[in-house]
Image (cartoon, rainbow, N blue to C red):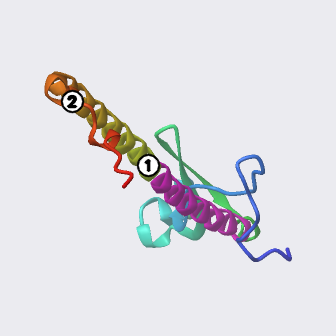
Amino acid sequence: MTDSNPTVPYSLNNPVPARRGSISPRLVKCGKASCPCAHDPDARHGPYISFTHAVSGRTQSRFLSEEEAVVVRRQIERGQQFHNEVDAFWKLCEQAADKELDALKAASSEAAKKGGSKRRSRRSSRPPPSRKSKRS
Ligand SMILES: [Zn+2]
């Protein structure tokens, strides 16, 4: 494992190993009725490394070996980085979307002014003053 750097070039058409979810240590019961862990919380086994993530609204978890945990931690780190960049990208997209709406508003208020000038067209039917070009 030479790649300890979570920064890997990725794009929407170049997926890289990344995950959503979290890793946490967990104490477990082994399930044997004869084992003290069945009754005593302090006698539970572990801690084991548990990876938890939501799959279509449901929380799923699985245990990882130490070796897997190293890899999954890096994948989660990448996932968070990706998430942050997507968030920032969304902000830019929404700013652009607002600008598009503002432009529409400006255009329609411009059109409203023109519509209003139609009503006042009788008054403004005089030739524009620019025609009176003074060439003296
Ligand atoms: Zn036990």
Please name whichever residue, 52 or 2, is drawn nearer the observer in this view of the structure.
Answer: 2
Q: Earlier in the sequence, mark 1 or mark 2?
A: 1
Q: Note whether residue 90 is visible.
A: yes
From which residue to which does the magenta span run?
Answer: 69-93
Residue 108 placement, left or right of 55: left
Q: Residue drawn 39% across and 51% down?
A: 135
Figure check: 58 above or below 19: above
Q: Secondary structure at mark 1?
A: helix
Q: Position of residue 76 (x, y in %)?
A: 62, 63
The residue under label 2 is 126
Q: Position of residue 71 (x, y in %)?
A: 73, 67
Tell whether position 41 is magenta: no
Q: Position of residue 112 (x, y in %)?
A: 24, 30
| Three-letter code, disc 1 | Glu
Please name whichever residue, 75 or 52, is drawn nearer the observer in this view of the structure.
Answer: 75
From this viewpoint, which residue is outermost toward the front? 136
Tell whether position 83 is magenta: yes
Quadrant for the C terminus in the image: bottom left
Q: Position of residue 40 (x, y in %)?
A: 42, 67
The residue under label 1 is 94
Circle 1 residues within 10 Å: few <14, some 14–19, many ≥20? few
Figure check: 132 above or below 91: above
Locate residue 101: give its quadrant: top left
Please name whichever residue, 74 or 98, is drawn nearer the observer in this view of the structure.
Answer: 98
From this viewpoint, which residue is outermost toward the right? 2
| Three-letter code, disc 2 | Arg
Q: Secondary structure at mark 2?
A: loop
Q: Residue drawn 27% across and 41% down?
A: 129
- What distance separates the C-alpha of mark 1 from that of mark 2? 45 Å
